[in-house]
Amino acid sequence: METILRYKREDLIDFVVRYMSKIGVSPEDAAIVGDVLVSADMRGVESHGLIRLASYYGSRIQKGFIDPKTPWKVIHETPSTALIDGGNGCGQVVGKRAMEMCIAKAKTAGLAAVSVKHSNHYGIAGYYSMMALEHDMIGMSFTNSQPLVAPTYGKTAVLGTNPISLAAPTNKAHPYVLDMATSAVAYGKIQLHEKMKENIPIGWGVDEDGQPTTDPTKIKPGGHGALLPLGGMEVTAGYKGYGLAVLVEIFCSALSGGCFLSQVGSPAKPDPTCVSHFFMAINIESFRPIFDFRNQMDDMIALLKRSPLAVGRDEIMVAGEPEFEYAKFNLEHGVPLHKPIVDDLIADGEKIGVQFDLVPVTVNHWSLGIRHEAPGTRHEEF
Amino acid sequence: METILRYKREDLIDFVVRYMSKIGVSPEDAAIVGDVLVSADMRGVESHGLIRLASYYGSRIQKGFIDPKTPWKVIHETPSTALIDGGNGCGQVVGKRAMEMCIAKAKTAGLAAVSVKHSNHYGIAGYYSMMALEHDMIGMSFTNSQPLVAPTYGKTAVLGTNPISLAAPTNKAHPYVLDMATSAVAYGKIQLHEKMKENIPIGWGVDEDGQPTTDPTKIKPGGHGALLPLGGMEVTAGYKGYGLAVLVEIFCSALSGGCFLSQVGSPAKPDPTCVSHFFMAINIESFRPIFDFRNQMDDMIALLKRSPLAVGRDEIMVAGEPEFEYAKFNLEHGVPLHKPIVDDLIADGEKIGVQFDLVPVTVNHWSLGIRHEAPGTRHEEF
């Protein structure tokens, strides 16, 4: 049996603001961190949500591995580009400011890009790409991350799960929001199978010899074995996922002069992580009227969704659709948190004298197991 | 036994110029078509090389499905963007002109993008992204293409194999050139297995019910079955490849107002194909000194290549490396063409009164089978 408590979105953000303010983050910056983290739980990407508040952020700020003041600065700037030093601050704060800059530049320049070095884990990549939507722009957001993935024909984790996010506005359909790790799966999925003592499919990871394995215990990046890039082994084109992971590195770290590949640290280790990000905004009106673009997006999505179904399947989805449905449900019914996460938030708050005294909207009980919650929970992690 | 004839690069391009000029293409445009096609054979992407000269281009021009004059025009333009109507002309000509425009704009604007509608198959995507390299820029090139791929949970081909290409300059290493279909594999690979009566791995395609299959005869996009997106079935994250294919559509067709998904025609059918493309150039000096960027690319590639090898493997490669090695070999020893392709070129030339009278540099004989030619042949197709 597991218990899920649902809270009001604003209450959770308010807790993050109180928590982060207490350890030196300005209330304004803390509100950004809270919004990004709670958005992850809202959208069903719980691995990037409040579960990380202390482990990825709070405890690391207290230990001096992240600068709570986030002293980011622009190193170089043109009307359409910027290179930012994140000042080893909160990735969410740098990320939001960088994407705001991108959007402002794209308004006059047509399109704009910002590359960021010396930052930290910024949460869900989709948060930043989606910022472009209300400005009638296409948004993109990439980040490198701690080594978890082996290159094709390798056996050691040297690449991050380096996610790619793209958001594009629509008219009536949900916006198209792709937010995907370039690894075959999130490490969290492998850990979950290990916990449940279930085998994993071929294509998720390799063992210490670089051979495909169905045993989740053989995949411990940093120790032995590694995740595989999207596509899996060479025969199913894993070199393409590997190629995309390097594409992300080029935009994030080679353009910014930031740390790359195994230079990027893990939030579990006692050092700054030195993460690099990349953001882009494309002003659609620089190409054609936004109204026409939005309608064509709707037409394209409709054509995909009415494509003939495979036997045994109910619906064809497009990227972002399950997350929007899930977020809508959670906005109405409360943002779900598993009880152990709530217990951690209570304990982490107590440590610094901040009370997690929120009243849940509802409390649900579920039987335990690997399952797909309706609608649309996923367990992505990078 | 199969026979491979090797020809001088310039001789092959000259033949294409004579062939295309004879059917109404200007010599200048014909030289572009020739360079793009021969570059594919040079780089080992033979499915996009001279094998397509008549079937994708020549015969379609003669039948009126492609306009040999390529009357492309700029519909809308800003200092950093352009929307081009390809005039149903040769995709290679429109592609090259669009990328040239992109590069010229990026020189002053920092970065630039061009979206193209109403074009035709443009050959290898990497040709255009690589044009950015000598300008100290990152180049990108996407195109949509005829439906061959089913969306996740679908069973019918509605998506093209929509390739993504990115090229980034280096110092001493080969430039990084990713040129990948967003499908798990090229349709040509499945056809090759059918010809050799060999099974295919799970993850390449689905049968008429949308179920995974190892039988290549069950995958005939347009008839029954379909290719799968990169990642394969849902359990190995095929929805990510599906998401990337739609990303390509957004840049190519939604930004340009061009045809999308199943609106895109096949070169095998008696109609214009209405293909859409997208190009981007990013001026690296807008972010940081090109010298620093190039050196960091070298460092990153070196780090990947010296990563520990899986048992049984000889070398970790990076994207573009095998193609550069192969092209170097072919520049020295002649561009290889299989004898049946040479026979077709002779016959296609005769039909319009153009002689394929080239003298091969060498003639090699091989035993027949599915094999990996050294160094680096691949058989990609989209």
Image (cartoon, coloured by chain):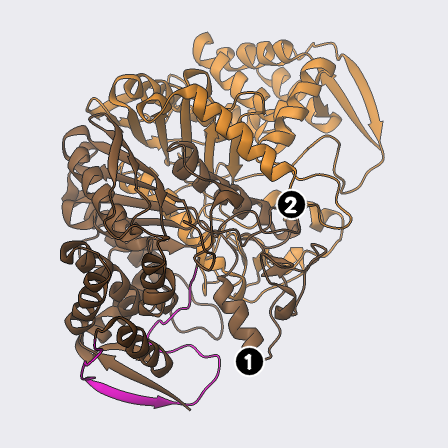
Chain colours: A brown, B orange
Amino acid on which the number 2 mark rests in the picture: Lys
- Residue B189: assigned label: 2
Residue occupying the point 23% across, 29% down: A80
Which is closer to the viewer, label 2 or label 1?
Answer: 1
Residue A323 as seen in the image, left or right of residue B181: left
Front residue of this view, candidates B374 and B195: B374
Dividing the image into 4 quarters, which one contains the N terminus of chain B?
top right
Q: Contact (CB < 8 A) between labels 2 and 1?
A: no
Highlighted magenta segment, given as a residue range: A355-381
The Cα atoms of the two marked residues, 2 and 1, are separated by 38 Å
Regarding residue B204, the answer to whether it shows in the image is: yes
Front residue of this view, candidates A265 and A325: A265
Residue B295, given in percent of the width and then of the height, sits at 50, 24
Residue A250, given in percent of the width and then of the height, sits at 44, 35
Q: Secondary structure at mark 2?
A: helix
Residue B132, given in percent of the width and then of the height, sits at 42, 21
Regarding residue B263, the answer to whether it shows in the image is: no
The answer to whether residue A378 is magenta is: yes
Residue occupying the point 32% across, 25% down: B87
Indicate the chain on which mark 2 is placed. Answer: B
User: Mark 1 highlights which residue?
Assistant: A196
Q: Badge 2 local density, few (<14 within 10 Å), some, or many (20+)? A: some
